[in-house]
Image (cartoon, rainbow, N blue to C red):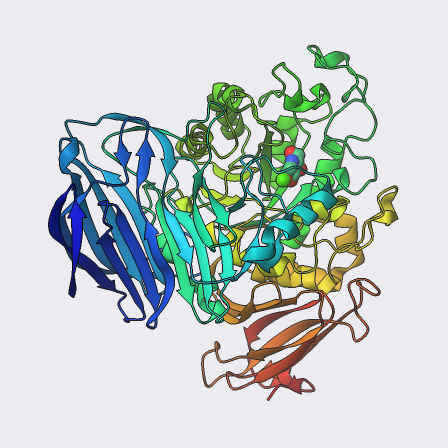
Amino acid sequence: MKHVLLTVVFLGIACVAMAHELLSPNGNLKLNVVLDSEGGPVYSLYYKGEPVVEPSALGILMEEADLSNGFRILDATNSTFDETWMPVWGEYEKVRNHYNELTVTLSQPAKHDRMMIVRFRLFDDGLGFRYELPEQKTMNYLTVKDELTEFNLTGNHTLYCIPGDYDTNEFAYTTAAISEVREAMERNLRKKGYEAKATSFTVQTPLMIKTTEGLYINIHEAALVDYSAMLLNVDDKEFNFSAHLTPDKLGKKGYLQLPLHTPWRTIMVSDDARSILASQLILNLNEPCKLEDTSWIKPQKFIGVWWEMFTGGGGTWAYSDYYKAKPGITDYSKLTPNGHHPANTEHVKEYIDFAAENGIDAVLVEGWNEGWENGGGYLKERVFSFTKAYPDFDVEGLHRYASSKGVKIIMHHETYSTASDYERQLHDAFHFMVDNGYDAVKTGYVGRLIPRSEYHDSQWMVNHYLYVVKTAADYKIMVNSHEAVRPTGVYRTYPNWIAQESARGTEFESFNDGIRPDHTTILPFTRLMGGPMDYTPGIFEGDLSTYGSNKRKRSSTLVKQLALYVTIYSPIQMAADLIENYKRYPEPFQFIKDVAVDWDKTDILEAEPGDYITIARKAKGKNEWFVGAITDENARTATIPFDFLPDGKKYIATIYEDGKDADWEKNPQSYHIFKAVVTNKSVLKQKLARSGGAAISIVEATGEEGLRGLKKIK
Ligand code: NOJ
Ligand code: CA
């Protein structure tokens, strides 16, 4: 470590402080840490010699203690770490965790030597740092007023972002220069008639940034545990960002007790957008798996009694038309069925049959349980029961039926954000699941919270989501949470947290303010940085007016829906459309049947946020590969080199491409499927329609026989 000498005036006493420097293992990133003239810790970050983050403040303001200045550096130590570990499931069979660490121990001499450690980990693809407060005599309980961490950027860069909000992240993305972003974001919000909840000018993380020099930066956090989620305040004149922690409704941003550490703040940097998508930094900053037995955690595909509640065809979660009309129902046996309640035994059996016939692992059923008539958490009474089924849903019979066909049913717990009531019912709910053969639950937190003193992203709720996941693990239950706080890699520690929604997903294809063609080219750079997304792709019928009142058109071609199974990573993937649409399109459905959900290796072939993504992945433990390529509203030609395949062999690629005349607006259903011979020298120039895509499945050729008559890709 180089030492740069700086003169610092500290509490009136001139003293000499050292700037501490740290290099990433390959030397591309350099971190600099120093105390300013007030004794406040300041860091800066350089990439290949150029500044990426200019001197930026560190510190936390507690109600009981100001931990942002008056420090001196007691100690600064360097170390190196290099380890390869194997995730329970993931995009890679092995993950290398290689960083250089700088631990800076600070103390406040004027405040009884109060102590704070800032730990920095510098990887080849970015920086993580966190605050640690070891046990000490002069501090114990703390209330967070503000975290003061800054990210001072170097210019008027382009942001790919959603507005700050304490309750939701289901926004359309805005792409704009920092100086323009406020107006552009407000324009997007007004279109939706939606008012963001955070009053100051904030954006959410993961925040994707492209600098005026063409560097890619991503700011997020890792291991968000027992702390509130971080938004970023935006200074659009100085291009400075700073932490904005989600408060509770008393305005408190966290209740802490020593010893403690905060989540990691993360800054990824690269001159190649592909490295941002390939980065494992956030996972590496999370704790290793804490579950001893993980054999019951299974990546899987599922279909669901679901989309028919969105298509406009009349399906309801509720059993009766009491829905919204007469809140306060207590005796569900007296309800009159409305005749369009898809979560009924016969219909669920059709889904189970279809799953069994097509090798789909599971069927999600929404609207199976009592409570939907009460209109949800907008009302004051307790709403859902997680152990009582509607009269037309035969829990035991369906358990027997599904087991006989080798299919699982996925439980649905929509809470309407009645989080405390959910906690009260949790053990009963999980017992009920185990008794009836369920091993996965989709949870939901639609609406504003009950208890009303919290937000979706405040500390109490962050703890709630994890409490549900940990409790679920005791029952060997996988959790796929919707409307929960956006992920920060905690699934490394609790891999039964199999996916989350936490962003605008496919359901918005049915809403007026829908999905834009570029949305899925931004999600992997933003929301997915923290973990897998239950995006629920696979909508084959592109025109919702087919079903009735709703006039929305899907935002992509049919083939792009296939490509999303590869470009949007998740170990649990839904085939979201109605089974009747899969029956209408058996040829493209073959790709969904074939595509893997767990991977040995991932190669990001092409990527540009907001424009396009092409990814190749190798199925876990199998000689099968899948490629997905997607584009935004512009048609383009993807370049797909097959050098991710082992050398010296021939392979058969089944290529699902947009038809010649395909176009997401004018001709979204047009597709073409063909087989071709490829080797690891082949390079395919693949045309993608406007908001189109391509999906490829690849197997080893078993002999020359099967190759006859097939096109060869050079
Ligand atoms: C919102 C979820 O994202 C969606 O998938 C679910 O069907 C509804 N809430 C109802 O729970
Ligand atoms: Ca949702």
Q: Is residue 687 above or below residue 36?
A: below
Residue 525 visible here: yes
Residue 104 or residue 584, whichever sits in front: 104
Quadrant where the C terminus lies?
A: bottom right
Where does the image place residue 678, in percent across and percent down from the top left? 58, 82
Residue 17 at x, y = what percent?
Answer: 15, 54
Residue 528 in the image, given as x and y percentages of width and height = 51, 53
Residue 655, percent from left and from top:
66, 73
- Image quarter where ligand 1 lies: top right
Whether residue 150 is situated above or below residue 98 in the rendered picture: above
Number of numbered labels in the structure image: 0
Vertical arrangement, residue 216 with respect to residue 446, above or below: below
The N terminus, quarter of image: bottom left
**Residue in the foreground of this view, choosing between 346 and 663:** 663
Q: Identify whether 302 is placed above or below 328.
A: below
Instruction: For residue 597, say whether it is visible.
Output: no
Q: Residue at x 44, y 52 (%)?
A: 240
Outermost residue, bottom side: 714
Q: Nearer the viewer, residue 365 or 23?
A: 23
* Location of residue 66 by image quarter: top left
Q: Nearer the viewer, residue 267 or 433?
A: 267
108 horizontally vs 643: left or right: left
